[in-house]
Image (cartoon, coloured by chain):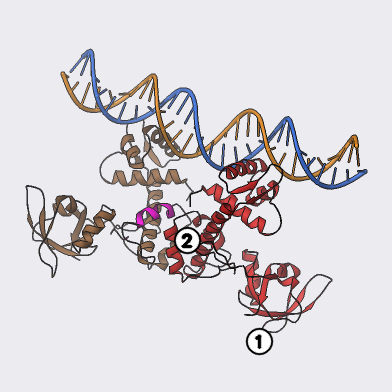
Chain colours: A red, B brown, C blue, D orange
Amino acid sequence: MLNYSVSEENYIKAIYHLQQMGQNVTTNQLAAAIHTSPASTTDMMKKLKNKKLLNYKPYQGFRLSVGGSKVALSIIRRHRLWEYFLAEKLKFTWDEVHAIAEDLEHVSNTKLINRLDEFLGFPGVDPHGDPIPDEKGNIATHAKKCLTDWPLQTTAQVVSVSDHSGKMLELLEHKKIKIGTKLSVRKKFDFDGSMEIKLPRQPLLTISEQLAKNIFVNHDA
Amino acid sequence: MLNYSVSEENYIKAIYHLQQMGQNVTTNQLAAAIHTSPASTTDMMKKLKNKKLLNYKPYQGFRLSVGGSKVALSIIRRHRLWEYFLAEKLKFTWDEVHAIAEDLEHVSNTKLINRLDEFLGFPGVDPHGDPIPDEKGNIATHAKKCLTDWPLQTTAQVVSVSDHSGKMLELLEHKKIKIGTKLSVRKKFDFDGSMEIKLPRQPLLTISEQLAKNIFVNHDA
DNA sequence: GATTTTTTTTAGATTTGTCTAAATATTTTT
DNA sequence: AAAAATATTTAGACAAATCTAAAAAAAATC
């Protein structure tokens, strides 16, 4: 696998995440995600297209090619392994790990990453519950569902959260919700989208729609 | 502490190492150390001078200012802590750690480095025996001497080695010499500079002048 | 001490990644 | 379907870090 610049890697990663949900990624979408101008984005898209990482026709948006996806998964692997390391070994909190991993992920030494993986005991998910791709780029696609779409009275297990901020962490810690927590939705209120949920050996909790939208669940293992 | 680019950090670190032994660092010396052209070096020196990291007058060579030395020590701290991590936790060999740490050292997050230091148990020296500066930039200046200058029949302890190559590692492993090994010089031969040395519970060993020049020792603790 | 050699600096280009402003294409609205 | 709004691309500029070639300064040699 060739090496790419920090900038190239950031674009590739952002495209990967954006194309997860929906069709082609647009110039403005990507520019916003990366905090850059649409003009810079177009420039970079031409470059990535030349390197065959991208399927891109002017004005039509873009998707990663097979090769581009491989590169993206390798970056995501590095990112999530460092996140796991930071949380597990260096005792950083959940909301701190992302920013530091953004820097560490660009050190692209395959042997380093594989040794780190081994040292950490081949973790399956990062501290936010997102799956970590293996050396070959395989990634567990757990069919997670947003808590807002989960049926009532059905046991669920929290598999991931999509907001990584300290504010969300504070709220989740207060409510005693973390990755792996089992819960069921008892009641939903159409007025504001809030819901009452039940955790084992805990009184009924009320959570806002905003919070529920950022919690992803799966069937109880 | 401000942030510096990867290039700036590489120049700063190289100047620090070069000025350790001798007077002002010259343009050609630095250009050679960093594998760049003298012209690029002059450009960068102007820049570092503007940032007050350097004492530099055209044609006179340069030395780091007090501020510049602080920056250098911070980079060296990061480098050596990562080297320790790579050797101790990820089981990399001695000659592999330097190149990887060259990349990791540029991730300059103070909290990350202090947590790493703590996680590693505040190691005093890196895998090559070089001292690791503490958070404040204090560095143990062990008055090490080159083995070629050590008196005969006097017990010494290996404190560091100045060549980090795999070839040197191979030779040292074969001779069973490592950081901390105690030895004494029994005989020196003027003809080729080779010497006979004695390790505890080992037969007499002969080592070349070239090898001895890269081994640094201290009084037995 | 004048000349040659070496070292250092300057001048001018190049690459990467970015920007703003203008031009062009597409989509939406009326 | 024409006009207005929005999205995208092009054009031209700039900063950082590098290069080569030429000029200038310092050191070494004769």
Do we see residue A112 in this rendering?
yes
Kindly identify which residue carries mark 2: B112
What is the number of the mark on residue A164?
none
Figure quadrant of the C terminus of chain B: bottom left
Kindly identify which residue carries mark 1: A201
Q: Are marks 1 and 2 in contact (CB under 8 Å)?
A: no
Q: Position of residue A166 (x, y in %)?
A: 61, 65
Image quarter of residue B153? bottom left
Q: Secondary structure at mark 1?
A: loop
Residue found at the far front of this picture: A66
Comparing marks 1 and 2, which lies closer to the viewer?
Answer: 1
**Residue at image coords 42%, 37%:** B44
**Residue at image coords 76%, 77%:** A151
The chain holding disc 2 is: B
A43 sits to left or right of A109: right
**Pointers 1 and 2 within a single chain:** no
Q: CA distance from mark 1 to mark 2?
A: 37 Å
Q: Secondary structure at mark 2?
A: helix
Above-or-below relation of B173 to C26: below
Q: Position of residue B57 (x, y in %)?
A: 36, 32
Q: How many marks?
A: 2
Above-or-below relation of A73 to A120: above
Q: Amino acid at mark 2?
A: Leu
Q: Position of residue A28 (x, y in %)?
A: 70, 47
Image quarter of residue A131? bottom right
Above-or-below relation of B64 to A186: above
What's the magenta region? B91-106
